Amino acid sequence: MNQSGSVQRLVLNAESTEWAIMYPLPNDPCDNYGYCGANSICRNSHPICMCLQGFTLRSQEEWEVFNTTGGCVRRTLLVCHGGEGFSQLQGVKLPDMLEFSLNKSMNLEECRLKCLMNCSCTAYANSDISGVASGCICGLGI
């Protein structure tokens, strides 16, 4: 295990007597839960962590030393039902959600409207993407 908490399988290069990484586990640093902290996105590019639109770094000093676990905070206070909406993110893994609601019969627009009516709703997505995108999963903030 390395200093970042990732497991690595190493092999000794006999010609140079140096260790080489065969493969790390997980392969994707974004698979480490909470790697970028709250209200941020983890990407396979540089910088790996980025605040979502409308949010700013909780601690610039921590991010400068690559401790991104503190995440991001809102730039302005949330005004529920004050015209705020959602930013569309594509090609991302859904976060682990401790609390969510699920409705298998809604389409995505109905899902969006339902989520906008609930001040605790932090995100929404289709719950079934195996065929025709359908269903509704709403992530609820704690």
Image: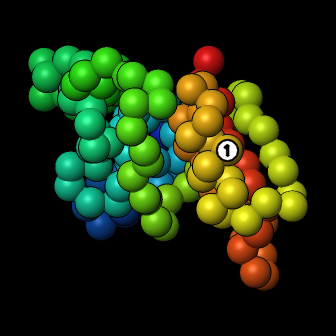
Q: Is residue 42 above or below residue 99?
A: below
Which residue is at a point 31% across and 18% down the rendered structure image? 77
Q: Is residue 121 above or below residue 10?
A: above
Give the x, y percent position of residue 138: 68, 43
Q: Toward the viewer: 19 or 17?
A: 19
Label 1 crowd bin: few (<14), some (14–19), many (20+), radius 10 Å: some
Q: How many marks?
A: 1
Tell me where residue 51 sits by quadrant.
top left
Q: Is residue 125 left or right of residue 17?
A: right
Label 1 secondary element: helix
Is residue 85 rendered to the left or right of residue 132? Answer: left
Q: Is residue 4 visible?
A: no
Q: Residue 96's quadrant in the figure?
A: top right
Which residue shows up at 49% across the image and 59% down it? 92
Image quadrant occupied by the C terminus? top right
Q: Which residue is mark 1?
A: 114
Outermost front residue: 82
What x and y, as percent, mark residue 80?
47, 25
Residue type, mark 1 in image: Lys
Kindly identify the residue that appears in the image at 14 percent across and 22 percent down. 60
Point out residue 32 in the picture as x, y percentages from the top left corner.
Answer: 52, 39
In the rendered image, residue 69, in percent from the top left (x then y), is placed at 37, 25
Residue 107 visible from this viewpoint: yes
Q: Nearer the viewer, residue 32 or 139?
A: 139
Residue 141: image quadrant is: top right
Is 138 on the left or on the right of 141, as rendered? right
Residue 129 vs 125, above or below: the answer is below
Residue at x 77% of width, y 76% of height: 130
Image color mode = rainbow
